[in-house]
Amino acid sequence: MPKHQLHPRNVHRDGYDFAKLVQACPALSAYVSPSPSGQLTIDFSDPKAVLLLNKSLLADAYGYQEWSIPEGSLCPPVPGRADYVHYLADLLGSGNGGQPPHGGGVQILDIGVGASGIYPILGRALYGWSFHGVDISPEALQALAAHLAANPHFKAGVSISLQQDPGQVLKGAITGKAVYDAVACNPPFYASAAAAAEENERKWRKLGKAAAGRNFAGQAGELWCEGGERGFITRYISESRELPTRCFWYTTLVSRSAHLPYFERLLNESGANAVHVQPMGQGQKVSHMLCWTYLSAPLQRDWARFRWQ
């Protein structure tokens, strides 16, 4: 993973110290071996190895213990998700004199928090923020609650709830008088299970190997939904337009850059006051973080002054 692709504050910029990571997660040792150049590494096409690598990273760099996800659940790449959190901090800091806000007074909504709870874990560890995570899967939320219980310091700043209507994004997630400083989202990418399987087979063929599952796994709602990424984010933008003052910054990961012009046009038509696209390097892949706010410049200044200072 090239150093220059990761955020300057990302502790994973220098790669992986596998000797240290094995100390944090001894089970990882069975999957670590020398590369042709003699450096320790793992087989990144092995889902179990990838899972244990990310578990060790959370324990070693962020102090999160007993992290586990159900078999077949999406295993998020910790360095890339840490980049998202750091860039989100920079985005909030742009309205705070250039200083990323810290502390539990910063309230983040995580749409599709998943069994991993990766954004709340990283956001709590790095900036002390408070999170509310929403998901359509009761099983995912149950798994998340289990490992949060083993990490009381993290659990204290995280609440979770079930999204009752899988067809909605923000509706049913932003309820009552709740107001958030930002929304984080890693949307489903594919339009169907068949599309996900086809892409997976294509990647394995490119590697010259027989299909052997996805190294980061993932299930319905995590990897695919009606309309795929384009459909999901279209619904997200539409619903955000109806809640212009309930959140400072709406954000989402966008995996397919070809979708960005369409999303930017939708946001301009929706009356967004500011739209920002942040490239993020994650391994050999470059994703983008799409961010928008409906608040005017004066309201943005007032928001930061009254909520974070």
Image (cartoon, rainbow, N blue to C red):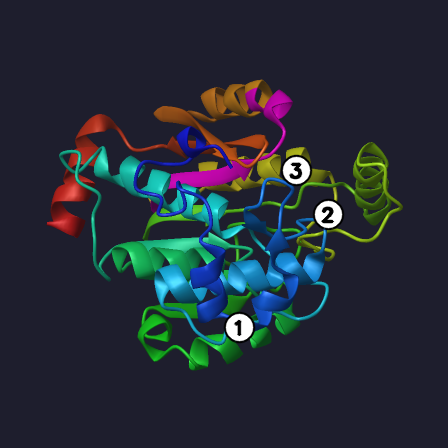
Mark 3 crowd level (few <14, some 14–19, many ≥20, 10 Å Cα): many
Q: Residue at x 65, y 60 (%)?
A: 49
Label 2 to label 1, Cα distance in Å? 33 Å
Q: CA distance from mark 1 to mark 3?
A: 37 Å
Disc 1 vs disc 3: which is toward the camera? 1
Mark 2 and mark 1 lie on one chain; the one further toward the N terminus is 1
Q: Quadrant of residue 300?
A: top left
Please tell me which of labels 1 and 3 falls first in the chain.
1
* Point 20% across, 48% down: residue: 101
Residue drawn at 65 percent across, 46 percent down: 188
Determine which of the numbered discs, if any, sits on residue 42 in the image. none
- Sequence-first disc among 3 and 2: 2
Does the magenta portion include 253?
yes
Could you classify mark 2 by the number of other residues whose Cα lies within 10 Å: few (under 14), some (14-19), or many (20 or more)?
A: many
Q: Nearer the viewer, residue 270 or 55?
A: 55
- Residue 93 locus on image (x, y percent): 22, 38
Residue type at numbered disc 1: Pro
Amino acid carrying mark 3 in the image: Glu
Horizontally, residue 72 falls left or right of residue 273, namely: right
Q: Which residue is mark 1?
A: 26
Question: Could you say whether the residue bearing mark 1 is in a helix, strand or loop?
Answer: helix
Crowd tier of the residue under label 1, counting other residues whose Cα lies within 10 Å: few below 14, some 14–19, many 20 or above: few
Tell me where residue 299 appears, x and y as whole percent.
21, 35
Q: Nearer the viewer, residue 109 or 126?
A: 126
The three-letter amino acid code for the residue at tag 2 is: Trp
Which residue is denoted by mark 2 in the rendering?
224
Image height check: is 228 above or below 120? above
Q: Which mark is residue 229?
A: 3
Asked if residue 256 is among those painted magenta in the image, a careful observer would answer: yes
Region of the chain picked out in magenta, as a range? 246-260
